Amino acid sequence: MYTLKKSLGQHFLKDENIISKIMDALKQDAFTNLLEVGPGGGALTKHLTKIPDINFKAVELDLEKIDYLIKKYPELNDKLIHKSFLDIDMPFTEPFTVIGNFPYNISTQILFKILEWKDNVPVVIGMFQKEVAQRAASKEGSKVYGVLSVLIQAYYDVEYLFDVSNNCFDPPPKVQSGVIRLKRREEELKVKSDRYFWVLVKTAFNQRRKTLRNAVKGQFEQEILQDEIFSKRAEELSVGDFAQLTFKMK
């Protein structure tokens, strides 16, 4: 068997009903290439490897789990990448779907890594700590709406699929979990540039208690700042609002 490593945030899914729901969500969109992040003990992997006519790879940092998976599922030989997801190069030359019970200690970083590959990743099905999943899916006006929400939703439509109880894992984590689906937007968001957009969003939320006029005053000419929208706070602006404002930046 294998040991569970707290240092890697390992909580392995064991509930077959939840696994079935994740698989159903995955199969709603066609794909040829699939990357699983953090296969662990193989709860999802054993089902993913049975999907016909796809190229499958999985990335796993824990060598013990890799050895275990290859022994239990010999078909995984040459399909496992022994690295942290944050350190790998793009695993396929063509578009690929990403799926995983993501390690909660790096889950936000995982989403930002996926944004680097956004042109090649049309769909993501991911399990996250519930708080992170809600943040990624939240809309303007929500208390948890922030930098992550805006930057992810600039490129993806995010759907919160379902909650997952901590009792569905071994060992049970102290937090609840949630599964979300990211689907790349059909219509590309028009921005002055990605760099302008990211700077504006991060600057605005860095001082989220201030009005936009005070939070981002260094990014705009004084006469532009008189516009009514700058009387709002960052969490009141939609993704589209931020995008439109980039064209008025210095």
Image (spheres, rainbow, N blue to C red):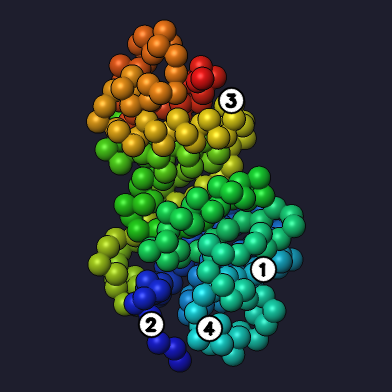
Query: On residue 56, which mark appears?
Result: 1
Which-is-in-front pick, marks 3 and 4? 3
Query: Mark 3 highlights which residue?
Result: 192
Observer-nearest of 38 and 210: 210
Disc 3, SS: loop
139 displayed left or right of 27: left
Q: What is the spatial separation of the Cα atoms under label 2 and label 1, in whole angstroms? A: 24 Å
Query: On residue 4, which mark appears?
Result: 2
* Mark 3 / mark 2, whichever is N-terminal: 2
Q: Residue at x 44, y 18 (%)?
A: 220
What type is the residue that disc 1 sits on?
A: Phe
What type is the residue that disc 2 sits on?
A: Leu
Query: On residue 63, which mark appears?
Result: 4
Image position of 242 with respect to 227: above or below = below
* Mark 4 / mark 2, whichever is N-terminal: 2
Image position of 169 with respect to 139: above or below = below
Snapshot quadrant of residue 165: bottom left
C-beta proximity under 8 Å, tags 3 and 4: no
Q: Residue at x 36, y 76 (%)?
A: 7
What type is the residue that disc 3 sits on?
A: Lys
Quadrant where the N terminus sits is bottom left
* Mark 1 / mark 3, whichever is N-terminal: 1
Q: What is the spatial separation of the Cα atoms under label 3 and label 2, in whole angstroms? A: 47 Å
* Mark 1 / mark 4, whichever is N-terminal: 1
